[in-house]
Every structure is written in structure tokens, then in C-alpha cells.
Image (cartoon, helix red, strand yellow):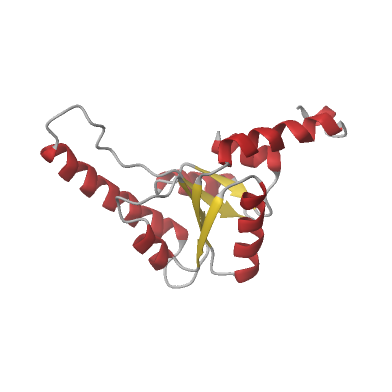
């Protein structure tokens, strides 16, 4: 699937099939203040079998992702009014730490009490500084808008 093989139709099928296997039945939260971007992202994820829920703000994302929740992953826009994706992610990570700490003090067996939802930034900006800021605030990676199957596969696998 190297750059030189992009014209080969079989290479396009592999990420698509693999994405379908990875995303089928997964519950994913899409956070973006722009309705068109939410619709496009949700459509792309649904195409691969994901169960998608959309919200339009960082505050709404925090409310939906208060542990314990039923989501398998979150795609977070980084540029939103009121609260950007960086701040929303920091607050979600703080909530996860608090709940994990409380669960570990109450746990009497070997249950895994760590909460960590994969959060991927959605951005049209793919410069290194943005990637570093994503990782610094607790995001697990990023995908460019619009989604490309191969990049989406790399980030969700």
C-alpha cells in the first residue's frame, strides 16, 4: 500500500475492508461545531459499520463521555468556539483519572479499573506543532478532514 501503488484498486479495498472489520458495531462520538463536518464524518464512519453519535461542542462531549459510558472512540474537532477540542480532551482525561482512581480504591479483585477512551483529533491542519499539541493534551492521534481510508485505518487500528 505504498505511495507508488495508489492507482491499484486492490489497495483501496484492503483499508476499506479492514476498517469495516475494525469499526463495525463500535459506538463512536463525533464532536464538531460545524454541521456539515459532523455529517461528513458521521457518514464516513457509518459507511464502515460504526454506530455514530454526534454533538456540536466540547461541553456536550464532556457530558457524553463522563465515565462510565458506552463509547469506543471519539473523533474531536480541535477548533470550536467556547471550548476547543484540546481543552475538552484535557477535561475528559481528568474525569477518567478521577474515576479510575476511585474505582481502583474500591476494587477488591483484579478488574481493570482504568478508563481511557481513544480520542482522535479531526483537523485540516496537519503541521507538526498541531500533532504535538494533540498528544500533549491527551489525544491519541489525529485524522485529517476529510477522512482518507488509509489514514483512518492507521489511526484506529
Task: Please say if 73 is above or below 83.
Answer: above
Measured as percent of width and height from the top left, residue 62 is found at 36, 61
Measured as percent of width and height from the top left, residue 31 is found at 50, 61
Pick the residue in front: 28 or 76.
28
Residue 125, by quadrant, is bottom right
Measured as percent of width and height from the top left, residue 48 is found at 64, 45
Residue 14, by quadrant, is top right
Residue at 82% over, 29% down: 10
Measured as percent of width and height from the top left, residue 54 is found at 52, 62
Q: Residue furthest bottom?
A: 82
Quarter in which the N terminus is drawn? top right
Specify whether 29 is left or right of 19: left
Residue 77 visible in image: no
Residue at 47% over, 46% down: 73
Residue 6 visible in image: yes
Specify whether 125 is left or right of 61: right
Q: Residue furthest front?
A: 25
Residue at 57% over, 48% down: 50
In the rendered picture of this protein, how many numbered marks are placed on residues? Answer: 0
Quarter in which the C terminus is drawn? top right
Pick the residue in front: 82 or 62.
62
Residue at 58% over, 41% down: 24
Amino acid at each position: 500500500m505504498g505511495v507508488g501503488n495508489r492507482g491499484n484498486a486492490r489497495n483501496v479495498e484492503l483499508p476499506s475492508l479492514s476498517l469495516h472489520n475494525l469499526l463495525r458495531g463500535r459506538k463512536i462520538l463525533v464532536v464538531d461545531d460545524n454541521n456539515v463536518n459532523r455529517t461528513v464524518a458521521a457518514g464516513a464512519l457509518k459507511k464502515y459499520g460504526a454506530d455514530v453519535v454526534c454533538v456540536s461542542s466540547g461541553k456536550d462531549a464532556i457530558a457524553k463521555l463522563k465515565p462510565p459510558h458506552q463509547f469506543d472512540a471519539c473523533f474531536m474537532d480541535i477548533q470550536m468556539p467556547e471550548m476547543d477540542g484540546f481543552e475538552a480532551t484535557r477535561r475528559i482525561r481528568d474525569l477518567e483519572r478521577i474515576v479510575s482512581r476511585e474505582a481502583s480504591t474500591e476494587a477488591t479483585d483484579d478488574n481493570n479499573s482504568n478508563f481511557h477512551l481513544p480520542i482522535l483529533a479531526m483537523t485540516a491542519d496537519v503541521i507538526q506543532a498541531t500533532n504535538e499539541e494533540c498528544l500533549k493534551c491527551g489525544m491519541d492521534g489525529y485524522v485529517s478532514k476529510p477522512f482518507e481510508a488509509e489514514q483512518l485505518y492507521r489511526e484506529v487500528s
